[in-house]
Amino acid sequence: METSNAKMKMFPKVLVLPEFSNGILTSAAQLLLNFANENATSIDMLAINCDLPSALSIGVSKVYVLASSAPANIRAASTGVAMLVSALSGRYDAILVARSSPYHVALCKASAVLNKVVITNVFEIAPSGDFLRTTPSGLLIQQVRYLAGPPCLLSVNVNATKCKPFQPLPQAKSLQIVHFDAISLARFNVLSCFRRKSAAYQGCLPLAEASFVVAGGASFKSARLFERYLIPLARRFKGAVGASRSAVEAGFAPPTCQIGQTGAIISPKLYFAFGISGAIQHMAGVSGSNLIFAVNCDAKAPIIKRSDVSLIANMFEALTKLNAS
Amino acid sequence: MKSFHLVANFLKQEVNTSLKFLTTAKVITNLNGESTRLVDPIDDANAFTFIDWSSAVPSFTVSVASISSPEDRGALKKFTTLGAAEVIQLSPSRQLDCLSKAKVLKRLVLSRSFSLVALGAQSSDVGSAQLGPILAGLLNWPCVTDVTAIVHIAKANILVQRSVGNTLVNVCVPLPCVLSCDLSRNEFRSPPMLSLPSSEVKPITIEPFDETNLALSSQIKVIKEIPVSNIRLGLTLSPLDSTLEAFSRWFGNFKR
């Protein structure tokens, strides 16, 4: 029996679509399972691009494993995934995906089939049953009420969630294998892939996992200066390197480093910004930081007002001294 | 000689290909604290990219559609100046959710036989990029998200580049299709002087918004908006040496 102060679970039964990378749950998928665990009594899972033992070891009630002759490109075969989700939706009270995963697109397509709206960027469910979600500016939280019937389609902003870790069951209670022809379901052809080199960033943590993030803007003027000043600092303090959109567009940093409304939304313990003006689109990505420290030579830059501690100084001078200290 | 004929045939096909593109424009309040209304910079860049294509291949026509209030008409005027064939404004009498907006756009796309719809990467519903996939789902068209460049447009397909994490992917999509684009938006664009007089006589089309044909009941309701109580300290420090020394000391303790 649950204690009186335990949180009331909103959904009796949910279907979760977690993302796997080489058969292992991604960090976003783990956070999604935590969110599902906090808000649902029974969790079922649709496992795509995951082998059977790995899918069973996660410890949810029921696992649907997609059997495909080739790994499925979720982005190309999103219509097929949407059809599958639509077919399963009648058995569930809610379907959960991570906002940052490719399943977000599949859920949106399923919403067109089911004639149900997707509630996006949800990070918490209020005791009243309303959903709390983040807005692009990061300055407001919207409390949203869902007016239609089940299933409720939720796209979760997993980086903003604060849930207890998921307690896995010893073994999945049931398993169903679904045959899925990933190749014939693809709606467009991938002609070529090109992975951009980022060898210089080895030794730095991914943005989502770091408690210390050091970021730079377009004022670094070149990728060489960006790597020379920021990477040693990130490596030394076991953190990650971030960049503003303008720095990424100028080619100074890889797109995986982009922070802001169209990049990563992070919540580190310390965010260190060098030469970043602090446009509201960028600040939306860092508003969850515990402490923002900004170094800028322009005292009128918006980031000076939006940071905890700011230093009006030449950033190269400051970085040289920090790296030497 | 054979290759010359191939190229000539290809160019002939390109010139004769008549394609109608639709890009959408979301009108937002200037985020930097001013009260002016402007088109979302991502939608701006999308429209301009396709207008560039249409100026290179005259048989391509670009229309810009916006679901916005009548007061926002001024913000849309620039698209007629820049060379859009038509600017269509749909003004619903009440707030619509994303699914309803997609239904409205579907009706527009089918009635005017557009072969490509390009939406902004953040449209719509708190910047969640769901309008494109929903519209594609309603039309049963392929949908490509995270598009960062339009490489080539041909009669039956379009070649686009998308950026997924650290990987650039070239994708060939059959037309008709829906693209969710985030094309480079830092480029400054200004309308050509010669097009100013002609744009003055080109009105913005107001599409009649007959809600009776569509079941447009919003499935979500915003109960309240809570300001984030993230009050920053706002300390400005100087000089450099003592600040950094103190910071290094403090950060050493912080990591421990």
Image (cartoon, coloured by chain):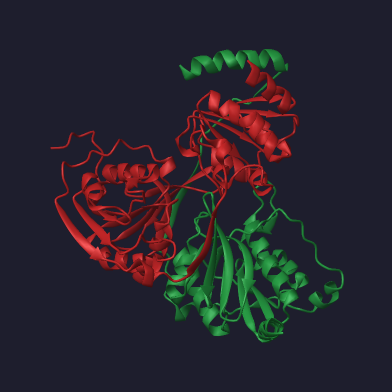
Q: Which residue is rendered at x = 55% and y = 77% of the image?
A: B209
Q: Name the spot of residue A19 as percent of width and height, x first.
A: 36, 51
Residue A213, above or below B117: above
Residue A290, above or below B139: above
Can see residue B181? yes
Q: Which residue is rendered at x = 27% and y = 61% of the image?
A: A66
Residue B112 vs residue A208, the one in the foreground:
A208
Q: Name the spot of residue A320 as percent of width and height, x first.
A: 69, 22
**Which corner quadrant holds the C terminus of chain A?**
top right
Quadrant housing residue B191: bottom right
Q: Name the spot of residue B163 as percent of width and height, x first.
A: 55, 55
Number of numbered discs overlaid on the protein picture: 0
Residue A15 vs residue A186, the one in the foreground:
A186
Q: Which residue is rendered at x = 68% and y = 56% of the image?
A: B185
Locate residue B245 relative to residue B219 in the image: left or right.
right
Can see residue A126? no
Residue B20 vs residue B233, the one in the foreground:
B20
Quadrant housing residue A163: top left
Q: Which chain is red?
A: A
**Which corner quadrant holds the N terminus of chain A?**
top left
Q: Which chain is green?
A: B
Residue A169 vs residue A204, the one in the foreground:
A204
Q: Which residue is rendered at x = 61% and y = 13% of the image?
A: B246
Residue B133, above or below B242: below
Q: Name the spot of residue A131 as percent of width and height, x first.
A: 38, 49
Quadrant housing residue A174: bottom left
